[in-house]
Amino acid sequence: MATGEDLRRIALSLEGTVEAPHFDRMAFKVARNYVTLAADSRTANFKFTPDEQQFKCMMLPEAFSPVPNAWGRQGWTTADLSRLAEEDLENALRMAWERAQPRKPARR
């Protein structure tokens, strides 16, 4: 069973990650937010691609679900941390972290 403290520890171990307030949550970001942690530390919202979201929700439906609304259609996915093993949490964080890296400038 993963916890909010596990999320914080793992996220901050990923290169370039900083923690900052984001409305009523804490956000973890590199160039952009890749996960937010609820104030009660029970759930987190991850930024996946829609395909990654579908995969996570298929593999661990008891833990992952799309955020209901347009944010969910963009890949934002809620995780019930108590239903994740620490290894699953780390895999989800790494997947979202990779997508949050600075974009490379377009070649001209």
Image (tube, grey):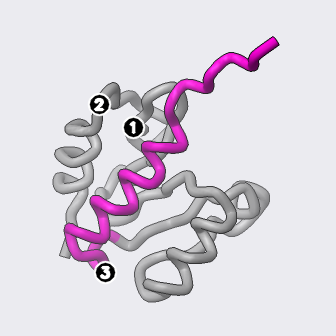
**C-alpha distance separating marks 1 and 2:** 11 Å
**Callout 1 environment at 10 Å: few (<14), some (14 to 19), or many (20+)?**
many
Mark 1 or 2, which is nearer the eye? 2
Left or right, 82 with reference to 1 = right
Question: In the displayed structure, would residue 7 be above or below residue 85?
Answer: above
Q: Which amino acid does label 2 sit on?
A: Glu
Disc 3 designates what residue? 83
Question: In the displayed structure, would residue 37 be above or below residue 22?
Answer: below
Magenta segment range? 81-108
Q: Which amino acid does label 3 sit on?
A: Arg
Mark 3 or 2, which is nearer the eye? 2
Residue at the front extreme of this rendering: 108
Give me the residue at 24% from left, 56% from top: 4
The answer to which of marks 1 and 2 sits earlier in the sequence is: 2
Q: Is mark 2 on a helix, strand or loop?
A: loop
Disc 1 designates what residue? 28
